[in-house]
Amino acid sequence: MRLKTLEINGFKSFAQKTILEFENPIVAIVGPNGSGKSNVVEAVRFVLGEQSMKSMRGKGGSDLIFKGSKNLSKAARAAVIIYFNNTDKVFKLTNDGGEDVNLNYDTISISREVFSDGLNKYILNGSEVRLKDIHNLLSSVNIGSSGHHIISQGESDRILNANAREKREMVEDALGLKIYQYKIKESERKLERTNENMKEVSLMRRENAPHLNFLKKQVEKFEKTKEMQTELGALYQEYLKKEDLYLKGEKDNLSAKRTKIENELKNVADKISGAEDTTSAQGEKKLEELRKVEENLNSIRSLKNEVERKLGRIEGMIEMEERRREQKSEIVEISQEEIKQVIGEINNSIDEAILKNDMAEVKPILKRIKNVLKKFSPDNKAEVPGSSEIDKFKESQEKILREIKELENKEKEASKSAENLRREINEQMETLRDLEREKFTWKVKHQELKSALEFLLIKERNLKDRKEAFENEIKEGEALIGKEALSFKNYQIENNGEAHDQEELRKKIERIKIKLEDAGLGSGAELMKEFREVSERDQFLAKEMEDLGKSIESLEKLIADLKEKIDVEFKEGVKKINVEFQVFFALMFGGGHGSLAITTETKRKRIDESEEGEETEDAEDVIIEKGIEINVSLPHKKVKELHALSGGERSLTSIALLFAMSQVNPPPFLVLDETDAALDEANSRKYGDMLEKLSKRSQLIVVTHNRETMSRAGVLYGVTIGSNEASKLLSVKFEEATQIAK
Ligand code: ATP
């Protein structure tokens, strides 16, 4: 791995694209004051990700961008690209999984751009990356971010001025332990994230727990009810199967009955209306006939009566005539007795009349007397008719008798036919009554059938209700034990097994149903689903916690291992540095001692933090920090304190230390900006020797005004400032360089 090229564009005084090639192990940059040499050093710092603006002599990003001059406009951004040869593929990048991956490029290019608003862009081989990727990448090739390998102007004794912790950091960086520090930081960040995740997940799990527990209890409860459900299922199957069969059978049965009854009804109704048609008409006809015959008979009879009366009169007259003829010869003899009686009556009446004064009272008496006397008057005797009249009477009599005879015949005939008709009517009445009886029977039958039909309809309605109840029962059952458990289609009714009647089954079902409804768990399908989901989530969270726990464990282990590694390597590194430091120190000072010491700082840490914040008895000592301290002892001098050294001595000490560190763990390159400024001629030579020694293992870029140093460089760049106020770079020969540097 080698530093190849530095390309500066728009950075500070380098208005235009300027390219430095690092083909030689020692490249010197020379030029007059203010020409922009240090800007080159800062360009290197910049491109390697320097974050301290102070170390680049600026306040913000815009200070790093060429500000413009009379004839040059200001740049929009400052860009620096550094190219490394990576044919040995040593550059590594830590991926997200924490693994180090060797980059497979022959050339690694790192570019950094800054814009006037301060925005920075880092580009690795054409792809934008994060700053930490740059740090990570560089630390893999021992280019630490503490910048111990870049010594800016006037900073040669920076390490001496730093505090113990900063010194330690520089030493760690020089020893290439920074990569482990990054890894620790990264792991700590991951650990923190993981811990947060862990907290989150465990919170979620805790939040989930009451619900899960509730469901678990419900499930346990449900398991208990399962037995009931099984029993209910069995009862239901039997019940429903029977009910189903019954309903179907009954439906068929009722509809068959209904058809039968309806047919019968129709039949009976036909019969009834048929009977009504035939019976009465015939009877009516006969009765009418009878009525006529009887009417005829009656008129014959009354005619006969009349004729008979006529006959009676005629016969009477005949008899009277015959008697008169007998009486004509007979003398009426009145007995003495009768005379005496009559005289007596007349005398009594006369006596009565004499006694009366009023004529009006005498007259009726006289009339009575006259009447008594009439008995004896000869006018009282009737005329006797002649014999021709009797003959006439007799003639009539015979005629009448013939008439009577005729009428009698007629009467006989009429009464016979009346008789016949009556008989016939009677007979007919008899059949009519039979028919009526029959009709009545049909009507009764009709009524019966109608009642039966009504009864059937009621039954059908009941059956319908029962069917509805059956369907509701299925719905209820499904809600309680699920559709599957209720499936009764294939249920075999066991005749030999325990046979329940429906009512008994119903009661049993109801009892279990009430118990299940009390438990309130339904078919359990919802519950089980929810339980499954919630417990799966819990398991998922548990697994997550386990994984996170493992990650935490492995991260903690990794961190501990890394710390251990740093600790061990740091101690060993310091030992090695001390060996080199002593050599370089003695070389620079012609004797004396220089060494690094690891310092530990201990603090008392309270275990039990009291409210007053006072330290309590429970406090314990904790080593919280390890630092580095530099001990020097100059030859022939008693001074041991660093701050008491002269500027040159400080410079020599820090150079010795810097070179010692670079010797132990050579960085790919070292940039030294006028580190040699304070050296006298003798020390300049020693410095030049050390440079050559170091250049065997690290590329050196030196900014110098020192002739001795220039003489050791293979390539010299002269930097001048032109009339356009921009730095200009040119490759120069040694003689030119010494000229330019003045
Ligand atoms: P010396 O030998 O005295 O140390 P040098 O060669 O190291 O000098 P630098 O310090 O690198 O010189 O350069 C300083 C010069 O760069 C100054 O003239 C300063 O005006 C110029 N400069 C610094 N920042 C910018 C900038 N953003 N735009 C233009 N010029 C700048």
Image (tube, rainbow, N blue to C red):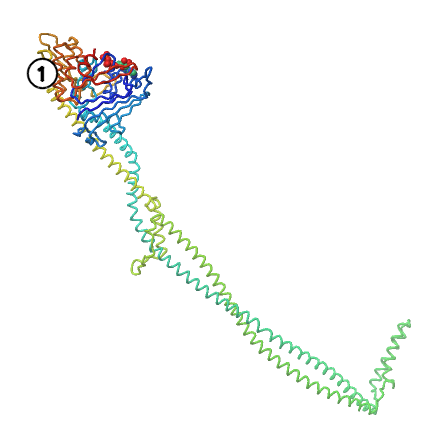
When asked about the image quadrant of residue 38, the answer is top left
| Rendering quarter of residue 426 | bottom right
Q: Where residue 731 appears, x then y in whole percent? A: 21, 18
Residue 600 placement, left or right of 515: left
Residue 208: x %, y % from top left: 29, 36
Residue 625 visible, this angle: no
Q: In x, y percent, where is residue 446?
A: 51, 66
Quadrant in the picture for residue 633: top left
Pick whichever, 531 or 362, lies toward us: 531
Q: The C terminus lies in which quarter of the figure?
A: top left
Expressed as whole percent of the image width and height from the top left, the position of residue 663 reads: 12, 20
Residue sitting nearer the eye, 606 or 556: 556
Q: Look at the picture and state if 222 lies above or below 438.
A: above
Left or right: residue 10 versus residue 463 is: left
Q: Does the rendering let one see residue 12?
A: yes
Label 1: which residue?
A: 583
| Total number of numbered discs in the rendering | 1
Q: Which residue type carries mark 1?
A: Val
Element under disc 1: helix
Pointer 1 local density, CA inside 10 Å: few below 14, some 14–19, many at least 20: some
Ligand 1 quadrant in view: top left
Which residue sits at x=28%, y=25%?
121
Q: Does the Cβ of the disc 1 residue fall within 8 Å of ligand 1? A: no
Residue closer to the observer: 643 or 501: 643
Residue in the foreground of this view, choosing between 326 and 117: 117
